[in-house]
Structures are given as C-alpha cells and as structure tokens.
Image (tube, grey):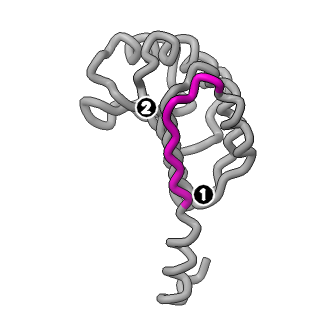
Amino acid sequence: MHLINDESYCIENTTTKEELLSLANNLKITHIEIKSDKINSSIFELLNDQVLVRRPEIHFWILAGTRRCDLSFLSKLSDLKNLHIRCVEVKNQETISNLSKLKFLEVDILVWIVLIFYHIYQIKL
C-alpha cells in the first residue's frame, strides 16, 4: 500500500493489516484505489473489515486502465458504499448488484475511446 497524496492510498498485494488499520484511522484519506484485480482476496476482506466498516464515506476506485477487470472480488467488500470503476472492459459485473450497502456508483468503461484511437490512428491493439 502506498500513499498517492494526502487523500488517497493505493492497495497492493503487499498491503498489511497494520497499514489498513492506519488507513482507517487517517481521517484525511477520502479514497482508496486499486490498479489490478489480481490482489489477494484476504486483503479485500481486511479492507472491508478494517476500513470500510469504520469509514463508510471512503470512495473505492478501480483503475484498471487498458486492462480487463474481473469484478468478482467485490463480493469481499460487503460494506462498500461508494464505487468508481475505470477500465476498458469488465467481467462479472453482476457482483455489483450484490453490494446491498452501495449508495454511489460511477462506471467509466473506456472501450469506445480505445476504438476511436484505433480507427483514427490505426494503433495496433
């Protein structure tokens, strides 16, 4: 896990329980992000139990960029209230419907942007 700026943390496979506890206690943090869906499921469980339960106002960002993102890990985040998704393509999007506490959802699927650049600039995908 690493601090991006005063308000943001990025969760990684090396994130520890102690770091998540510290994150939960840092009231300056307003959002948490991941850049991969390949993070160990135990980290997502800890994120839910140590952070989202205590800080329901936190926004969770999935920033997969040009990669396909499997959203099945969201089943581990049962206390998630604010979700932002930015990627090219998603898989297992039905998992979102099981987030019973979800209050805010923003989805930005970038596939059209990639296709436009492909046609305009003949970029090899």
**In the image, what residue occupies the spot 49% across and 80% down?**
117
Q: Position of residue 36 (x, y in %)?
A: 57, 44
Taking the magenta stretch, the answer to whether it contains residue 110 is no
Q: Position of residue 34 (x, y in %)?
A: 51, 39
Whichever of callouts 2 and 1 sits on the residue coming sooner in the sequence is: 2
Which quadrant would residue 48 be assigned to in this image? top right
Given contact means CB atoms under 8 Å apart, are the residues at marks 2 and 1 in contact?
no
For the residue marked with disc 1, what is the amino acid?
Arg
- Count the marks: 2
Mark 1, residue position: 67
**In the image, what residue occupies the spot 58% across and 19% down?**
79
Q: Position of residue 121 (x, y in %)?
A: 48, 88
Q: Residues within 10 Å of mark 2 (few under 14, many from 20)?
A: many
**In the image, what residue occupies the spot 65% across and 32% down?**
74
Which quadrant would residue 26 be assigned to in this image? top left
| Secondary structure beneath label 1 | loop
Which quadrant would residue 95 be assigned to in this image? top right
Mark 2, residue position: 59
Name the foreground residue: 116 vs 107. Answer: 107
Query: Going by the image, does 45 lie left or right of 119?
Result: right
Q: Residues within 10 Å of mark 1 (few under 14, many from 20)?
A: some
**In the image, what residue occupies the spot 61% across and 77% down?**
125
| Secondary structure beneath label 2 | strand
**Residues in magenta, as a range:** 100-109
Query: Going by the image, does 100 lie left or right of 9?
Result: right
Query: Going by the image, does 77 lie left or right of 108?
Result: right
For the residue marked with disc 2, what is the amino acid?
His
